[in-house]
């Protein structure tokens, strides 16, 4: 998916995936939202819906304000990368 933000064109296929959050409606999977990072450092949210929830639609946009990372899943490499970027702090 592509979007234009402040005159810059972003392509979700070229962004780095940092985390993901699966959505459910009445217990049924309805799609996933990804936190992605573009090559210029812009954080973007990319939602892919499977059409099971009329309130969840495909979208690719820059969030207004800070991202709420609650509930997002990351593998170890993604955790390490987010910590390197200063986006999260890993607490032992």
Image (cartoon, rainbow, N blue to C red):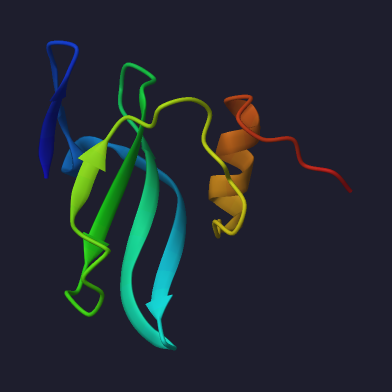
Residue located farthest toward the bottom when viewing the structure as drawn: 27
Residue 85 or residue 5, whichever sits in front: 5
Location of residue 68 in the rendering, given as x and y in whole percent from the top left corner: 56, 42
Up/down of 88 relative to 1, above or below: above
Asked which quadrant contains residue 91, the reply is top right
Q: Is residue 7 left or right of residue 37?
A: left
Up/down of 92 relative to 83, above or below: below
The residue drawn where x is 12% and y is 11% is 7
The residue drawn where x is 54% and y is 56% is 72
Q: Is residue 30 left or right of residue 64?
A: left
Asked which quadrant contains residue 1, the reply is top left
The residue drawn where x is 55% and y is 60% is 73
Location of residue 40 in the rendering, given as x and y in whole percent from the top left corner: 32, 16
Location of residue 60 in the rendering, given as x and y in whole percent from the top left corner: 22, 42
Residue 36 or residue 16, whichever sits in front: 36
Residue 76 or residue 31, whichever sits in front: 31
Q: Is residue 70 left or right of residue 90?
A: left
Location of residue 5 in the rendering, given as x and y in whole percent from the top left corner: 19, 20
Residue located farthest toward the front when viewing the structure as drawn: 55
Up/down of 8 relative to 1, above or below: above
């Amino acid at each position: 998916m592509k979007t234009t933000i402040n005159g810059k064109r972003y392509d979700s296929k070229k962004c780095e995936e940092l985390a993901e959050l699966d959505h459910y409606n009445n217990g049924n999977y309805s799609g996933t939202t990804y936190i992605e990072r573009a090559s210029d450092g812009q954080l973007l949210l990319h939602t892919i819906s499977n059409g099971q929830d009329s309130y969840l639609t495909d979208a690719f946009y820059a969030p207004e304000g800070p991202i709420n990372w609650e509930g997002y899943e990351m593998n170890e490499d993604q955790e390490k990368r987010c910590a390197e970027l200063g986006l999260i702090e890993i607490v032992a």
